[in-house]
Amino acid sequence: MADKKEIVLSGIRSTGNLHLGNYYGALSKFVRMQDDYDCNFFIADLHALTTNPDPRELHANVKNILAEYLAAGIDPEKSTIFIQSDVPEIAEMYLLLNMHVGIGELMRTASFKDKARKALGIGVPAQGDDDEAFEKEIIGAATNKRVNAGLLTYPTLMAVDILIQKAHKVPVGKDQEQHLELTRRFARRFNSFYGVELFPEPANFDFGGKPVKVPGLDGSGKMGKSEGNCLYLIDDEKTLRKKVMRAVTDEGPKEPNSPVSQPVQNLFDLMELTSAPDVVQHFKDAYADCSIRYGDLKKQLAEDILKVTLPIRERILDIRNDDAYIGRVLRRGAEEAREPASRFPQALWNCWWRFPFLSRFGGSILQIPPPPSLREPHGYTCPRPYGSSPLLFFPPYRGF
Ligand code: TRP
């Protein structure tokens, strides 16, 4: 037991390409964890469906993210890399776990409110959150827009991703902390309802030190797909330079040692991530003595970012062209991910035949064998090989 590595799991939704924020916030951390943990990294293509992407883009998006994972240094020899829909047990357990989840607790999650409001085209009320008014708008929305039920049950699906692999550590950003908290709650609830110790409670993974902040180029907050302020790993030289040169700044310091405005601080923050310490210091000194020229700073910043992203871009393009390699990685990943996942249906049946009443009084300790009818629930276990999920046949056929 002593040398058994802890299980790490994390995923990224397949909606568009990965950007510098994903790289520093997630991918580079994933890469560093590979030697010390039993790592599982997946592409959350079912979660991507909660925002109804264009069906024609589904598979291309999955393929792009996979190529980006690999190009950034996630190594299929060390980690399990898989696609969520390649593990059909996830969809099954999602159905089961939903029976133990309250719609109230789902409706109260911040990300649901945010996305539901976006879907309905309503803003955040000026005087803070009003749950009652929000509910009314969702249930009785006068518009012909709707909030899809998958969006509501997003946290159940995420909990299943984590629990089905029995993950101990889940490296995710602050915005996912609430989902992780729900996962822990669902795990406890499930375990205690059936009187079993099936699911461990997962913890966020923290490298220590100060959290990485990757700001966008528009002078506001963090880099994000929906903010439209991103530098993508796949951006070519010209595009990336252009974006950096257009980044928002200010009129420049008027007197020595002036405070730094947010947009300029953002550029310094990006520089801290990508440039050498003496380069950063040079520009900070230039700011302090008012000799700074933002044009020079941006040129240098673009140069240093390109040093990080261009080699990754080259690898992404190579990998995207190699369907045979992608197929090999995915088949292997699916097999590895399904190994623990496929034990769950049986484990669940084993819990279920015991009445909750019995288990509270020690039913689970008595280890009574399940009745024959439940030992093999269907009498026949469908082997369901890799590539048999109906989701793979969504248009256009995935083909890798
Ligand atoms: N919800 C996560 C995000 O938007 C993606 C995700 C889905 C995930 N399932 C997960 C992350 C399981 C970690 C573990 O970023």
Image (tube, rainbow, N blue to C red):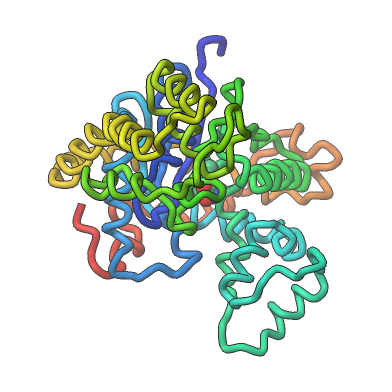
Q: On the picture, is 178 further left or further right than 268? A: right
Tell how many labels: 0
Q: Which residue is drawn at 22% across and 41% down?
A: 316
Q: In the image, is residue 256 above or below residue 112?
A: above
Q: In the image, is residue 307 above or below residue 262?
A: above
Q: In the image, is residue 124 above or below residue 179?
A: below
Give the quadrant of residue 67. top left
Q: In the image, is residue 200 above or below residue 14?
A: above
* In the image, farthest residue toward the right: 361
Q: Is residue 204 visible?
A: yes
Q: Where is residue 149 in the image (x, y as percent from the top left)?
A: 59, 70
Give the quadrant of residue 362. top right
Q: Which residue is drawn at 56% across and 34% down?
A: 170
Q: Where is residue 30 in the image (x, y as percent from the top left)?
A: 44, 30
Q: Residue at x 52, y 44 (%)?
A: 263
* In the image, farthest residue toward the front: 255
Give the quadrant of residue 137. bottom right
Q: Which of 11 and 313 is in front in this view?
A: 313
Q: Which of 213 and 162 is in front in this view?
A: 213
* In the image, farthest residue toward the top: 2
Q: Position of residue 139 (x, y in %)?
A: 71, 80
Q: On the picture, is 49 further left or further right than 177? A: left
Picture quarter with the N terminus = top right
Q: Which residue is drawn at 57% across and 22% down?
A: 207
Q: Is residue 168 visible?
A: no
Q: Position of residue 264 (x, y in %)?
A: 51, 40
